[in-house]
Image (tube, grey):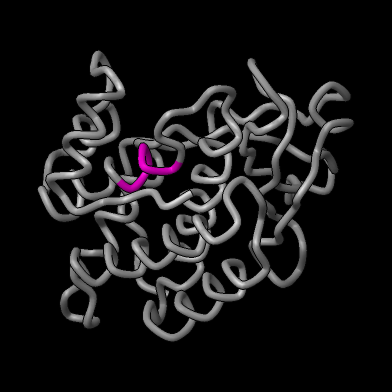
Amino acid sequence: MKDVPIFKNNITDIMFPLNDRVAGSLHDLAWLNEVETKAIVFGQGSFDLWCAYLIALNPDPSDNRWYAFAAKDAYYFERLYFLGTRMDEGLTLKKVYGHLMHLFELALRKPGVVDMDAISYIYRVSKEHYACWAGMAREMFFHVYYGMIAEENKANTRLGCLIKIHGLHELLIGQRPVDIASNCTRGLSWHEIQAECDAYGLVRYV
């Protein structure tokens, strides 16, 4: 495994011990490693039961608890951009975006529902295309996919998972900075976001 860079957006300081409120609401868990010590799962958030959490078992045997973290877009945007710059390993921003576009299409096949075909795709594409960065790619793709599912389940949504792929287009195709791409829809009406998606050729068929 090559040295992992120091990222600006990290989770170490803001993970919290998994409490009863969240633990009792968890559903649609997907393991992120073979030893089953890290997973992504939906649970109770501020507004609904579709907050995507990364949960991990503390490796310290003196604190054998599960910890949880609800990732902001900037967390996985930063790492996806990093993966797209590993050109010496055959990765490009457009290649990463292509994989995410296919994930977007899979998310639209069963809107708002976790699809096993999508989970299988994440495991396969990360293993086949991301070499020593497969673990990072797998985790970031799950963050994107679960984020898309969460958007589809938001009450009265107009755009659903278009929100996620729009931001990823800004990041990987428009090459806008992470902090800007991850917040690019703030202050915009859904009509304005829809117009930008139309210009990018992003369509939500539901």
Query: Where residue 139 appears, x then y in whole percent?
Result: 52, 58
Query: Where residue 9 appears, x then y in whole percent?
Result: 37, 36
The single residue placed furthest to the bottom in the displayed view is 128
On screen, residue 15 above or below 6: above
Residue drawn 40% across the image and 46% down it: 76
On screen, residue 28 above or below 91: above
Query: Where residue 173 appears, x then y in whole percent?
Result: 14, 55
Residue drawn 79% across the image and 27% down it: 22
Tell which of 39 and 166 is nearer to you. Answer: 166
Tell which of 150 and 69 is nearer to you. Answer: 150
Residue drawn 62% across the image and 31% down it: 15
Residue drawn 83% across the image and 48% down it: 61
On screen, residue 3 above or below 191: below
Tell which of 78 and 105 is nearer to you. Answer: 105
Q: Is residue 199 magenta?
A: no
Specify whether 61 is left or right of 11.
right
On screen, residue 99 above or below 31: below
Quadrant of residue 159 within the rendered picture:
top left
State whether the magenta stretch is mostly helix, strand or loop: helix
Range of residues picked out in magenta: 161-165
Quadrant of residue 86 within the rendered picture:
bottom left
